[in-house]
């Protein structure tokens, strides 16, 4: 079944003032839609045309050589963005502003403190040259912070993404221009730690 863009789980302007509604509308309706359209076209007629996006990304090598790069870029973009929308919550949502429970304990144990985790995660995003993502992943033995270029995803390396921030300019340029660090600082205000904790519980 061809990929489809999932609906946003909140209104376009629900993340304001941290992420503006104009950016969310273009990001979701235009950029994500383009990834879906291009991924479906690149997969048409292949053995993975009806596969789940996770299976597609884990089996890129089984595709014809001329399909691998467009599928990697566009199916990756679809998968990354589908996760990204679910890791954010409206500003009106009273859910906790920081993680607690098992996730918080794991973050403190791995990185020294929640603040040190945030600093390392931000550094991964700010330090990503050009376009890409910063991720909190479970690597099979515990938590780690990694960064990927373009629309690559940690699942290609056998890791489970638990949280990611999009640092392509299209994710922030209308509001923050070239101030990527300010965008990441603001983005923490809309992270849905309940969603992150659910992913951690499933991966741990």
Image (cartoon, rainbow, N blue to C red):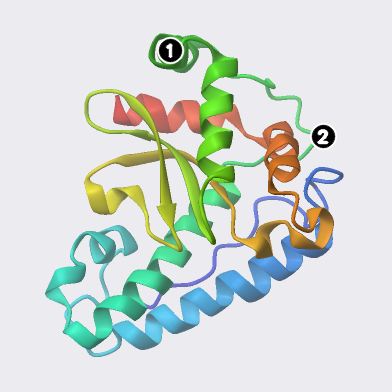
- The x and y percentages for residue 28 are 65, 66
The tag earlier along the polypeptide, 2 or 1, is 2
Q: Is residue 3 above or below residue 180?
A: below
**Mark 2 residue element:** loop
Residue 95 placed where, x, y %?
69, 24
> Mark 2, mark 1: which one is toward the viewer?
1
Q: Helix or strand or loop: what does disc 1 sit on?
A: helix
Q: What residue is shown with label 2?
A: 92
Quadrant of the frame with the N terminus = bottom left
91 vs 20, nearest the viewer:
20
Question: Height in image: 204 above or below 47?
Answer: above
Viewer-side residue, 185 vs 194: 185
The structure residue drawn at horizontal position 30% and vertical position 64%, both measured from the top left corner, is 52
Q: Residue 26, position in %: x, y?
A: 72, 70
Q: Is residue 100 left or right of residue 136?
A: right
Quadrant of res 88 = top right
10 on left or right of 33: right
Give the CA separation, mark 2 to mark 1: 25 Å
Specify the farthest residue to the right.
17
Q: Which mark is residue 159?
A: none
Is 56 situated above or below 135? below
At a point 38% along the width and 78% down the height, the residue shown is 2
**Direction left: furthest residue:** 62
Q: At x 53% / y 61%, what residue is drawn?
A: 131
Q: Which residue is mark 1?
A: 102
Viewport quadrant of the C terminus: top left
Q: Residues within 10 Å of mark 2 (few under 14, many from 20)?
A: few
Give the quarter of the image for residue 100.
top right
Check the image and report above or below for 199 versus 165: above
In the image, what residue occupies the spot 39% across and 27% down?
A: 200
User: Image quarter for residue 184?
Assistant: top right
Horizontal relation, residue 98 to residue 147: left or right: right
């Amino acid at each position: 079944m061809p990929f489809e863009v999932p609906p946003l789980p909140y209104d376009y302007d629900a993340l304001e003032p941290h992420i503006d509604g104009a950016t969310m509308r273009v990001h979701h309706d235009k950029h994500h839609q383009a990834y879906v359209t291009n991924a479906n076209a690149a997969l048409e007629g292949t053995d993975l045309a009806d596969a789940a996006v996770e299976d597609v990304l884990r089996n890129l090598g089984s595709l014809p050589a001329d399909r691998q790069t467009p599928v990697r870029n566009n199916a990756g973009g679809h998968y990354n963005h589908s996760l990204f929308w679910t890791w954010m919550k409206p500003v009106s949502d009273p859910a906790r502003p920081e993680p607690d429970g098992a996730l918080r304990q794991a973050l403190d144990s791995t990185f020294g403190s929640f603040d040190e985790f945030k600093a390392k995660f931000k550094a991964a995003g700010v330090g990503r040259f050009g376009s890409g993502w910063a991720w909190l992943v479970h690597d099979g033995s515990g938590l780690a912070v990694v960064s990927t270029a373009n629309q690559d995803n940690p699942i290609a390396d056998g890791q489970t993404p638990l949280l990611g921030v999009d640092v392509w300019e299209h994710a922030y340029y209308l509001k923050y221009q070239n101030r990527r660090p300010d965008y990441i600082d603001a983005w923490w205000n809309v992270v849905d730690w309940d969603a992150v904790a659910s992913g951690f519980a499933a991966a741990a």
